[in-house]
Image (spheres, rainbow, N blue to C red):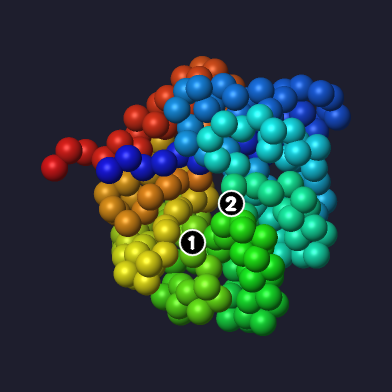
Amino acid sequence: MHRKLGLNIDHIATIRQARRTKYPDPVAAAAIAEAAGADQITVHLREDRRHIQERDVRILRETVQTTLNLEMGATQEMLKIALDVKPDIVTLVPERREELTTEGGLDVNHHRDHLKKYVQSLRDADLKVSLFIDPDLDMLRAAHRLDAPSVELHTGKYADARDEISRRNELRRIADAARAAAKLGMRVAAGHGLHYTNVQELVLVEEIEEFNIGHAIVARAMLVGMDRAVRDMVDALRAPAK
């Protein structure tokens, strides 16, 4: 089974924003990545605009040839942008201004009423919706009750595990959540903290159709170029023959 690669290009913009220049250009990076085999371009438009800017999203909507995945917080400002830009898919994520990177999945139960209306507004506009959640069966069921057709499982605890037992436990949680989601008819993606080595065990989880990976690929691209970095990850996502 072909596992799709969603390349998160946020950190191309991070380098650009460090000097407030026009380069490196996330749009150019996206084009190279698609030519190298990326199946999706993912960007997170944050409230504080620390990396990706609204202009980037609008240009990418016009240039991306595969799939444009817009990650965003469930705010009214972002809803307006999504309804205007119309990305191929919207992934709703939690967001705190002071966090270095996304720290966990959405608390779907706590924000149930707000998220239900929000998801419905996006679906009424014929936008595909995914919820970024922890690999937790209760959160998964809550996402399903919101009529979210897709989930992206947060793999941060797996990626950050400091010992073999913890890593195995997190891997099991991800696999169980992926299988449960598939049984509910939901499409399953995974991402956060994944790199060329630790993703290989997750590729064995057949229910995970897509991996969204950013930092590891951008970091490698600084040394070997974006084309090679993407091609190497595409190779890493190939499930071993049975």
Left/right placement of residue 98 relative to residue 88 reads right
- Residue position marked by numbered label 1 in the rendering: 150
Q: Is residue 57 visible?
A: yes
Q: Amino acid at mark 2?
A: Ile
- Residue position marked by numbered label 2 in the rendering: 89
Identify the residue at image location x=69%, y=55%.
72
Identify the residue at image location x=69%, y=33%.
62
- Determine whether label 2 and label 1 are within 8 Å by CB: yes
Left/right placement of residue 222 relative to residue 191 reads right
Q: Earlier in the sequence, mark 2 or mark 1?
A: 2
Q: Position of residue 104 (x, y in %)?
A: 58, 63
Q: Is residue 93 visible?
A: no
Q: Position of residue 211 (x, y in %)?
A: 45, 46
> Looking at the rendered structure, which numbered label has been put on residue 103?
none
| Crowd rating for badge 1 (residues with CA inside 10 Å; few <14, some 14–19, many 20+) | many
Mark 2 secondary-structure assignment: strand
Q: Position of residue 101 (x, y in %)?
A: 65, 51
Identify the residue at image location x=17%, y=38%.
241
Q: Nearer the viewer, residue 168 or 80?
A: 80
